[in-house]
Amino acid sequence: MSQREFVVLGTASQVPTRQRNHNGYFLRWDGEGLLFDPGEGTQRQMLHAGVSATAITRIGVTHFHGDHSLGLAGVIQRINLDRVPHPVDVYYPATGEVFFDRLRHATAFHETAELRPRPVFEPGPLPAPGAPFTLEAVRLSHPVDSFGYRLVEPDGSRLLPERLAALGLRGPDVGVLQREGRIERDGRTVTLAEVSVPKPGQRFAFVMDTRLCDGVGELAEGADLLVIEATFLDADAHLAEEHGHLTAAQAARVATEAGVRTLVLTHFSQRYPELDGHLAEARKHFDGELVVAEDLARVPVPPRRP
Ligand SMILES: [Zn+2]
């Protein structure tokens, strides 16, 4: 039984509010756990959400503004305090190396865990050893270098036990079939397609600080779950463009064009104490599953496409 869910740790852009912690997001994907954009207070939000440091296998930072990265110092020290036994890969824009180094070594602590820095120099596939998916970075448009991330699971197939049984295929036969795509049985060739159904891979996309640009649509394309910033409302669209952010309506339109199934809006400006407007403006453009994120909300990755 696989477990795939998205845990919202914080939803505030720029500054935390009484209701919203700085950004912070955790994607549980079977045995993997990806922490994205940890702002201040992420360690404590993880505690509230029941996410342990040991659950983290990778960290992705879109850009080095404080609301997306100040939490690195605390989280990295916690990973070491808890003696996390597996390596943790950390992805971040290479031009922010100095910020990463400072946050990583912000104060004295005893290093026990293996952190593997993976600076992102250019858009494209990222090194992700051991991952059952590919991870890609796509360039966004913000006053500082910003990369969005996309996780793509390859298409696979699911074996049908009743068809295997009917053909008398078992144990080692199944291994051969999976490895080679075919096997000889009773003088004929049985193909994998005959005894299985396609299992389409799933996609997750994470789009933070950016104005509308090609990268937003590229990341969102075909996503089962898209998490995207919606800092502003239509009335403040000029601020979005000026500061390199999106409005709820822009995010929703991109999601519809890209065929997104579940859309999660987050990263809200403190100027909006209530988020009814975000829901209403996004709803006009997107009729799939729509979540206006609240701190500590959990969003399941939708079931596979049929
Ligand atoms: Zn920013």
Image (cartoon, rainbow, N blue to C red):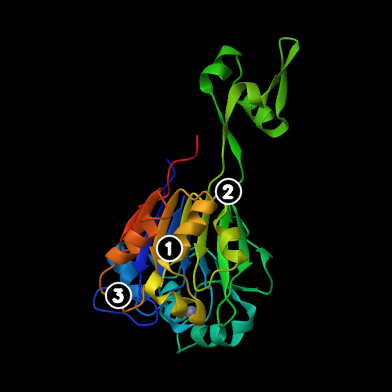
Q: Is residue 148 above or below residue 17?
A: above
Residue 153, numbered label = 2
Element under disc 1 = helix
Residue 182 location (% of width, % of height):
72, 25
Q: Are marks 3 and 2 in contact (CB under 8 Å)?
A: no
Count of marks placed on residues? 3
Disc 2 from disc 1: Cα separation: 28 Å
Q: Nearer the viewer, residue 126 or 213?
A: 213
Element under disc 2 = loop
The type of residue carrying mark 2 is Glu
The type of residue carrying mark 3 is Tyr
Frontmost of labels 3 and 2 is 3
**Lower sequence index among marks 2 and 1:** 2
- The residue under label 3 is 272
Disc 3 from disc 2: Cα separation: 36 Å
- The residue under label 1 is 249
The type of residue carrying mark 1 is Ala
Q: Are marks 2 and 1 in contact (CB under 8 Å)?
A: no
Is residue 303 something that shows in the picture?
yes
Disc 3 from disc 1: Cα separation: 15 Å
Q: Locate residue 293 relative to residue 63 in the image: left or right.
A: left
Q: Nearer the viewer, residue 274 or 11?
A: 274
Q: Is residue 109 above or below residue 129?
A: below
Residue 161, numbered label = none
Residue 261 location (% of width, % of height):
46, 48
Q: Is mark 2 within 8 Å of ligand 1?
A: no
